[in-house]
Amino acid sequence: MNSVKKSNANVKPNPTGALVLVIDDDQTTQVLAKRSLENAGFKTILASNGVDGLQLFDRYRPDIVLLDVEMPIMDGFKVCREIRSLASGRNTPILMITGLDDIDSIENAYSIGATDFATKPVNWAIMVHRVRYLLRSSIIFKALEASKVRLAKAQKIANLGNWDWDIKRNKVFWSDQIYRIFGMNPSDSRLDRKSFFQFIHPEDRDNLKTEFQADLLQLKPSNHEYRIQCENGDIRYLLQQAQFTLNANNQPLRLSGTIQDISERKITEEKIRRLAYHDSLTGLLNRNSFQERLETALCLAKRNNRIMAVLYLDLDNFKRINDTLGHDSGDLLLKIVAKCLIESTRKSDAIARLKNNQNDAEVARLGGDEFTILLSEIKQPEDAGLVAQRILEKLSGPVPLNGHNVFATPSIGISVFPEHAENSSTLLKNADTAMYHAKQCGKGNFQFYTEQMNANSLARLKLESDLHQALENKEFAIYYQPIIDSESGQIIAAESLLRWKSRKHGLVKPCYFIPMVESNGMIVEIGKWVLQQSCKQNAAWQHAGLKPIRISVNISSLQFRHTNLLDTIEQALQASALSADYLILELTEGMIMQNSDQTIQTLQKLKAAGVKISIDDFGTGYSSLSYLKRFPIDTLKIDKSFISDLPHDKDDAAITTAVIAMAHSLNLRIIAEGVEKSEQAEFLKHLGCHSMQGYLFGKPMSAENFQACLKNSQSSNEVISIEKTG
């Protein structure tokens, strides 16, 4: 009762000034009604029949209607029905005045929408009070209706509905918004407590029933999240909150609550979760997520005394493909590989072949072209090898990539718990170590971890650490390999080759340390030093009275993309006083094919500076020969892989013949590298190859030895034109 009084606090007890429409064909009644109502502070308008009354109602929208039953043209019952059919008259109080005292007429008045009735003769003093009471009730009703509309609107905006369960009667009230949330029409009566649970998602149904029974026992406010499956198949996430109403004996009378559709929030949370735990490019697990899964799997494996394995995978040619065809193609390749890994490790495929239906696999991308696979609960270590072999088979063939067929064979390392490690970090590290060993064993294979690999890995780490001090400690040296003219046999150029004479490790092979300086970025600083020393040495040979030759210097992809490349070259030439015409820059196919427009601009600037451009390892890339027309280059170096089996290998012979013929047609110089046999040299000379390089003519040697070799080569009187070196 207190709440009712409080809600009526703003309602005027005497709603004077309200407009009253009186519809009555009796003139005396009209006069008495007008006088009595206006004396009480009301405004009145009068109508003598039902037709006029309806017109006045539509025009003035009165606050209350006093309506006589018996009238000509249109009786009061019909007028009442017409008013109720109007949107503006749906809630207007209608007090019907009748001279009929039979029960049927009274019931008829109520059935067609009359608010109240009175019989004639009318006591107008009492009637004024009845009008005032009806108006006050109407104001309260309108306020409640407005509040209901606002509540319904707010609930619709919030996707929130309310419900109320009468526990004793087992009757449930559902608001219209709840019907909409469940994908039903509010007029549908099928939604009751029993059918409610039929909407619950099968995976959540039993759990929600259990929680609901616990709520009934504890009689505490509840909060539950669950899914429903609508009749159209849509899955929605709901948040339900409820509270009990108890009697004096703490017995539950009602359970009332709300249901909110939180599907949009759940979808957003899932997107955020995926961003946090999944790789955005491939959709695979990311590093953090994989680490968590690995920790969990290790705990289960230790508890249940089971074996598990980690596979660490790296694509052998990814950098080359990425540099040659661009990052978009590289990203596409990573997506293709990710799909292959999932297919290779799903239960219905590779793992099912292990005859262990309990096995499961988690595939992750750690970054770049590195992937990891977790095989939990394998029966024996060899099972991991079966999965690795399956992956190698699936990725062994050519991959179609934006009009190109590329090969993305992986190298895979395998570490097994508990044989190789008992914690996640060591397990992952050992798999990584095994992967590097697989690369050293020729790539495109898998290797299980061994203790010796770890020793080799530590040695490699030590080597890389010492490498950072090599330049400062002046441990680097440049060796020079002669390039000879095919016709005269004289040295016409030299290729500068970096060597590392470590104080701790002795002479380190380039295949060990060059990849290190490329991966850690030291190649830019070291490459600058090589360029400076090579120019300085070539100038020194000229100052010693030797005939000028060109010096060929390899430029890494990092150097080529560096903003101050041109300045570095000009500084090296100026510091050595070497003419730019005696400097050749060697670039790879993959390097110049990335961002070709920018490459052309860079090459044009280099050409304008006077240096020569040579393409190293020609024929091993994925580019089209058409780029030779676009790029300002001077020389092609045929890769030694095409030379080693000449002249006996028909395919290599055909390729070499075609390349030399094409170079002649484009006025490009040709250098064949890796020439080790005289029969190779004769075959190349016959094809018109301009220059050669290889062990047949000289291995890489120190500057002093090369100077002696050069002097001996130039001892004949024949003058070799500098143009022969291209």
Image (cartoon, grey):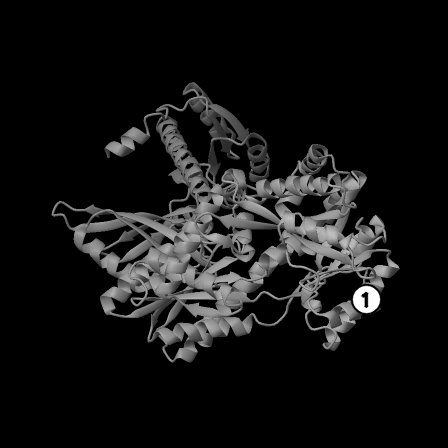
**Which corner quadrant holds the N terminus?**
top left
Residue in view at x 33 percent, y 29 percent: 8
Q: Is residue 636 above or below residue 352?
A: above
Q: Residue furthest left?
A: 249
- Residue linked to disc 1: 685
Q: Is residue 618 above or below residue 6?
A: below
Q: Few, some or many C-alpha atoms within 10 Å of disc 1 (few <14, some 14-19, many ≥20)?
A: some
Q: Is residue 105 above or below residue 48?
A: below
Q: Nearer the viewer, residue 96 or 532?
A: 532
What secondary structure is found at the residue carrying circle 1?
Answer: helix
Is residue 531 shown left or right of residue 291? right
Residue 604 screen position, x and y as percent = 79, 42
| Amino acid at pointer 1 | Lys
- Quarter holding residue 11: top left
Q: Nearer the viewer, residue 540 or 430?
A: 540
Residue 204 screen position, x and y as percent = 34, 61
Is residue 354 shown left or right of residue 218? right
Q: Is residue 377 visible?
A: yes
Q: Nearer the viewer, residue 243 or 445?
A: 445
Q: Nearer the viewer, residue 193 or 402?
A: 402
Is residue 29 shown left or right of residue 491? left
Residue 574 screen position, x and y as percent = 72, 33
**Total labels drawn:** 1
Q: Is residue 199 visible?
A: no
